[in-house]
Image (cartoon, rainbow, N blue to C red):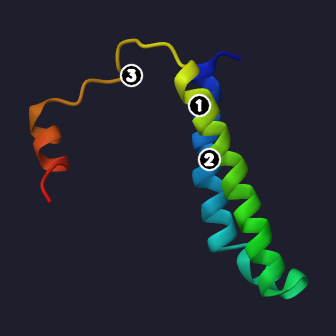
Amino acid sequence: MDASMLLMAFSGAFVGTHFLLSHPWRRPLVKAMGDKGFLALYSLVAFATLGGMAWASPRTPAGAPLWQVGDALWALATIP
């Protein structure tokens, strides 16, 4: 697996685990582990996935973007 795919995998894992741990799995895990245990798990998962993204990002070769954004979408995204 090349660095680009690893970066996408870590990014997907980061977003996916944040969604799962903040919505469907939060209540059962807090009940089983307690507040501090859950926060420790949440922090560990966030650190691991963010660390993976930080590791893979500089190893990703420079290349063409996956899609062209265009001026209109760029302007919309930069409005404060």
Q: Indicate the quadrant where residue 16 lies.
A: bottom right
Q: Position of residue 58 (x, y in %)?
A: 53, 24
Please say if 13 is above or below 6: below
**Cα–Cα span, label 1 and label 2:** 10 Å
Rendered-image quadrant of the N terminus: top right
User: In the rendered structure, which amino acid carries the disc numbered 1?
Assistant: Leu
Looking at marks 3 and 1 on the same chain, the residue that comes earlier in the sequence is marked by: 1
Q: Secondary structure at mark 2?
A: helix
**Cα–Cα span, label 3 and label 1:** 13 Å
User: In the rendered structure, which amino acid carries the disc numbered 3?
Assistant: Leu
Mark 1, residue position: 7
Question: 60 or 68, which is in the foreground?
Answer: 60
Relative horizontal placement of residue 9, taking residue 80 as reference (left or right): right
User: In the rendered structure, which amino acid carries the disc numbered 2?
Assistant: Leu
Mark 3, residue position: 66
Is disc 2 surrounded by few (<14), some (14 to 19) or many (20+) residues within 10 Å? Answer: some
Is disc 1 surrounded by few (<14), some (14 to 19) or many (20+) residues within 10 Å? Answer: many
Identified at 10% across, 43% down, the residue is 75
Identified at 57% across, 42% down, the residue is 11
Q: Position of residue 59 (x, y in %)?
A: 58, 19
Mark 2, residue position: 50
Q: Secondary structure at mark 3?
A: loop
Question: 70 or 50, which is in the foreground?
Answer: 50
On residue 20, the disc is none
Q: Position of residue 6 (x, y in %)?
A: 65, 27
Relative horizontal placement of residue 5, taking residue 1 as reference (left or right): left
